[in-house]
Image: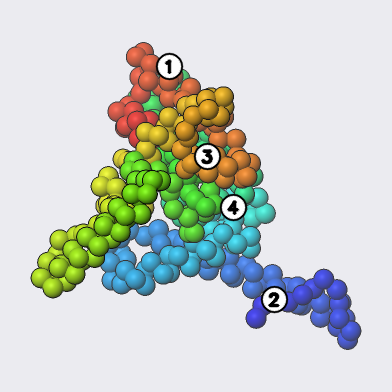
């Protein structure tokens, strides 16, 4: 109802009326942005405060907020914590660097990164650079113990934020879009392929056994789970299918990742890896440089003579 076109003045509308229309549109736009920011803050509340909301309603609201929050009109307000609005103009998306030194602010950023991802390569790069400014803060030798602890805690939370940002590059079919994609998963179970004449016969026998077992299960009313031979679940992913965890990719995936271009031309390669690389190339992200930077930084932090806290070491290992 608020899609008012103001590209040119229609007949019978003077400049004063046109100014009123523009002012009304600005008010409606600003109100929409603040409403979206309020919904994000509501989602950010602790689970105890949202315990009275039915799960199916909460999940539906969350999905709607994730979809609308990525629109250009409200994107800046959705991805930026409200406490930073006074120090950064709404037309600019990069996160305000001084406020990122605050631990609570960083945690709000992590929540928004996980919720909305990113919509363009520019947004990814700007968010990446903003988070790196937190990592670059290192304590001086004469710093007090409280100051050192604060910096190390900030580094730990910043590593969480960067890890969350990079994990979303594994979303398919669109990297950085958590509402429509799921994390890349390359199963360790290879499909059984029998190109000979016995292949179709084996398929027929397997199907008959499967449906016989399903019928027996229905008649006896047992709760034993029966899986088709060619549609088995990866047991490492049964209770963690929506998160990055153990069993995320197979050994074949990792072997393909470390192969040279020449080796891939003459060897059997993992198609999941090639599909993911194709998506990353289409998005224009220089993911290799990001990973190399983190590896170099983590190598420095894990040197024996570097005095880092246990919490930071834990986040490095998780990352």
- Would residue 262 appear left or right of 316 to someone viewing this image? right
> Which mark sits nearer the N-terminus, 4 or 2?
2
> Which mark sits nearer the N-terminus, 3 or 2?
2
| Residue topped by disc 3 | 274
> Which mark sits nearer the N-terminus, 3 or 1?
1
- Res. 116 visible in picture: yes
State the mark number for residue 3.
2
Which quadrant is home to the C terminus? top left
Residue reaching furthest to the top: 305
At x 36% / y 13%, what residue is drawn? 305
> Which mark sits nearer the N-terminus, 2 or 1?
2
221 or 173, nearer to the observer: 221
- Would residue 3 appear left or right of 241 to someone viewing this image? right
Which quadrant is home to the N terminus? bottom right
Q: Percent x, y for residue 2?
A: 67, 77
> Which mark sits nearer the N-terminus, 1 or 4?
4
Residue 49, quarter of picture: bottom left
Q: Percent x, y for residue 15?
A: 86, 77
């Amino acid at each position: 109802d608020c899609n008012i076109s103001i590209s040119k003045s229609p007949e019978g509308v003077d400049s004063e009326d046109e100014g009123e229309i523009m002012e009304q549109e600005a008010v409606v736009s600003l109100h929409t942005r603040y409403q979206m920011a309020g919904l994000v803050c509501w989602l950010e509340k602790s689970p105890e405060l949202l315990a009275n909301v039915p799960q199916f309603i909460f999940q539906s609201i969350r999905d709607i907020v994730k979809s609308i929050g990525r629109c250009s009109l409200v994107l800046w307000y959705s991805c930026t914590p409200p406490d930073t609005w006074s120090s950064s103009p709404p037309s600019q998306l990069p996160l305000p660097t001084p406020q990122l030194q605050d631990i609570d602010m960083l945690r709000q950023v992590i929540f928004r990164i996980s919720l909305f991802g990113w919509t363009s390569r520019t947004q990814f790069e700007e968010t990446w650079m903003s988070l790196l400014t937190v990592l670059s803060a290192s304590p001086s030798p004469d710093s007090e113990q409280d100051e050192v602890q604060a910096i190390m805690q900030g580094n730990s939370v910043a590593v969480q934020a960067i890890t969350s940002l990079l994990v979303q590059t594994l979303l398919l079919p669109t990297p950085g879009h958590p509402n429509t994609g799921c994390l890349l998963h390359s199963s360790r179970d290879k499909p059984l392929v029998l190109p000979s004449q016995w292949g179709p016969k084996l398929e027929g026998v397997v199907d008959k056994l499967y449906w016989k077992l399903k019928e027996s299960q229905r008649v006896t009313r047992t709760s034993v789970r029966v899986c088709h031979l060619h549609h088995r679940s990866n047991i490492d992913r049964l209770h963690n299918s929506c998160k990055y965890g153990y069993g995320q990719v197979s050994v074949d995936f990792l072997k393909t990742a470390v192969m040279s271009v020449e080796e891939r031309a003459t060897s059997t390669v993992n198609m999941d890896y090639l599909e993911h690389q194709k998506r990353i190339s289409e998005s224009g992200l220089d993911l290799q440089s990001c990973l190399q930077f983190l590896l170099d930084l983590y190598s420095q932090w894990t040197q024996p003579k570097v005095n880092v806290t246990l919490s930071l070491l834990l986040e490095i290992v998780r990352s």
